[in-house]
Amino acid sequence: MPATPPFRIIVMGVSGSGKSTLAEGLSKSLSLRMKDGDELHLPESVAKMSAGIALEDADRWPWLDRIAQYLDNKPPDTTGHSGGIVACSALKKIYRDRIRQQTGPVVFLFLNGKPELILKRMQQRKGHYMRAGLLDSQLQTLEKPSLDEHDVIELDIHPSIDEILHTALGQLKAYAQVDQTLPTASIHTQ
C-alpha cells in the first residue's frame, strides 16, 4: 500500500490557550502521535520560564528544530499514515516559517481568545512551570497569523473543548480537501 502524505499539525497559541488539551483530542481522533512542545525544551529553558524569565529567540531556535524533527521522524504505520501533532506556541511568523521550512506541508491551528480568559485558566493550573506572569510577555510576542499564512486555521477558545475539537476536525477536513498534500480520508468529524 502506498504511503499517504504525512499529516503534520501544530496546535499553537499563548500558554493557557488549551493547546495540549486540543492536541490530545486530535491525536485520539486522528490516530496520530502527539507531543507537547514543552517536552522538547532544554532544561535550561524550562528553568528560565520557571523563574519567570521569558525565552529569547536564541533559546527557541533549537526548540523549533526539535519540533520539526519530531514531526518528520516517524515512518508510516501499517495503514500508511505518518506525521504527528505538536502543541507549540509558535508565537512569531518567523517561528512558523522555520517549522515550515524543515517539515514541508504543515497545518497550524491557532487558538485565540481574550487575555482575561487565558489568564484565568493559567491561574487555575496546578504544577505547570509557565507562570501566569509571563502571559503579558507572550501576548506582546504573539504575531497573529496574517492572511498570507494559508496553512493557519484560527479557532476561538471560548466554547467547550468538545466543541473546539469538533470545529477543528471539520476545519481540517475542509482544509485537506483544498490542499491535496494532506490525507482527507483519515479525518472523521463526529
Image: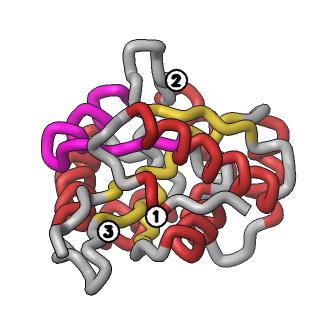
Disc 3: which residue? 40
Say which of 40 and 123 sits in front.
40
Front label number (1 vs 3): 1
Quadrant hosting residue 91: top left
**For marks 2 and 3 on the same chain, the one whose residue lies earlier in the sequence:** 3
- Name the amino acid, label 1: Ser
Residue denoted by label 1: 186
Nearer mark to the viewer, of 2 and 3: 2
Task: Please give left or right for residue 21 compared with residue 148 in the image.
Answer: right
Q: Which residues are magenta?
A: 92-109
Of residues 95 and 167, the one nearer the viewer is 167
State the residue at coordinates (65%, 77%).
127
Q: Could you tell me the amino acid type at mark 3?
A: Leu
Residue topped by disc 2: 144
- The quadrant holding residue 8 is bottom left
Query: In the current view of this chain or complex, which residue is farthest to the bottom?
Result: 78
**Residues under numbered marks 2 and 1 in contact, where contact means CB atoms less than 8 Å apart:** no
Q: Secondary structure at mark 3?
A: helix
